[in-house]
Amino acid sequence: MATPDQIDRVVNLCKRRGLIFPSSEIYGGFRSTWDYGPLGVLLKRNVKDAWWKSMVQMRDDVVGLDAAILMAPKVWETSGHLKTFTDPLVDCRKCQERFRSDELPVSGACPNCGARDSFTESRQFNLMFKTFVGPVEDDAAVAYLRPETAQGIFVNFSNVQTTTRKKPPFGVAQIGKSFRNEITPGNFIFRTREFEQMEMEYFVPPEEGAKWYEYWCQTRYQWFLDLGVPQEKLRLRPHEESELSHYSTGTSDIEFEFPWGWGELEGIANRTDFDLTRHAEASGSDLSYFDQENDRRYIPHVIEPALGADRATLAFLLAAYEEEEVPKEKGGSEVRTVLRLDWRLAPISVAVLPLSRNERLVPAAEAVAAKLRPAYMIDFDTAGSIGRRYRRQDEVGTPLCVTVDFESLDDQAVTVRDRDTMQQERVSIDGLLTYLQERFV
């Protein structure tokens, strides 16, 4: 069970070890925006790479796309975002803070100042960020920052299908920035106004929609388990009929048990033919597919798994974070903080550590690091005792540490330490790369 203070510990670790910083911090920060530091950018990139490998590289029925953030305003009018992409907003008359009315406490008290019966009538607030294209700020120059990456896939359906010659069922995957003017962002990187999405639109024959919806629900759930999220921290929750979007015949959320409760990680939706049909009607373009084998033409239905890269990164951090009591070398015990990240997600794969800053050891360790660097992300650290350096690597989830000691100069071998078991093994330098390749499978 996650403890309420776990998020504070993880946030502190992220700041202290260069994973995630508050944005614009030297100017007091900018609410709900975060910068990924040297280790955080590696972690998040690994999360995205793991998704891309699973969704695109390892499949022959999914291709990639990188659509523009700025799109014709007609796209958002047609998709319904300009009218229906809203949250219910209320203001507290006493402290002037704003909240989503559907997230207010049952008590009716203001979460900020505690005042009761102080809220205005609920009104709908559009989450789209508006901007202007070109030098003149008038209605003709209005554009929007995309609130999702999916529409870029839908308007490119014909381009992608024609150039790749894919036949339904096939998918188009995309990773990219999205922007939502959230009323109440918060919980670290869980809900922010600028975030990165990993979405895939899977186009299927209409009669196969239900089958592929179930397939993707199970496939995406398994992805989190395979990357080390404990099963007791995950659940697949089908939406009640009252929760469904008007275009959806089925939606399920993969939820994670965050310190504040269960929250959505990923949504899988059967969007039917809503998007392609609307864009075809509005644009006059033919977005149908002609099935030559069965001599029929149809608008494909769409199954959409949609995941936030930032939210997934947070879930992996929370699932991996652990504090344990371990014995000290000179007696007694100490608390060890460790991120038990899957090796595919860990920012650093291998740390190379000379036992000391001895003038003979450092060059030997640098040679080992140079040998490994083409294959793995390496950290080279000489500062502090070897025990302290081990702890630093444990904190950021480095699976293996390679120590070069004085014996290495004679036997051409190194000591490999495992993050999780803290067990050590002697491995020849010549066979080190093969040893690591066997470990990282």
Image: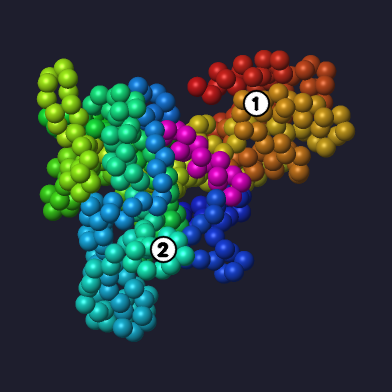
Locate residue 9 relative to residue 389 in the image: left or right: left
From the viewer's side, name the closer residue of 402 and 372: 372
Position above or below: 129 against 201: below
| Display colour scheme | rainbow
Q: Distance from label 2 to label 1 (Cα)?
A: 44 Å
**SS for tag 1?**
loop
Viewer-side label of 2, 1: 2
Q: Where is residue 399 in the image (x, y as percent from the top left)?
A: 57, 32
Reply above or below: 183 against 411. Answer: below
Instruction: Kindly identify the residue that appears in the image at 56 percent across and 41 percent down.
Output: 42
Residue 375 drawn above or below residue 175: above
- Write the residue at 47% across / 34% down: 49
Q: Is residue 38 magenta?
A: yes
* Mark found first going from the N terminus, 2 or 1: 2
Asked whether, in this view, residue 96 is left or right of residue 237, the answer is right
Q: Which range of residues does the magenta coloring cover?
A: 37-52
Please state the horizontal and vertical placement of residue 75, each as a whole percent of the image.
Answer: 28, 51
Three-letter amino acid code of the residue under disc 2 = Phe
**Magenta part, dominant SS:** helix
**Extreme-right residue of the structure:** 359
User: What residue type is disc 1 on?
Assistant: Pro
Q: Is residue 372 visible?
A: yes
Secondary structure at numbered mark 2 = strand
* Residue 338 forms part of the magenta stretch: no
Residue 276 versus residue 413: which sits nearer the camera? 276
Task: Say which residue label 2 marks.
Answer: 132
In which quarter of the view is residue 117 placed? bottom left
Instruction: Look at 51% across and 40% down and name the residue there.
Output: 45
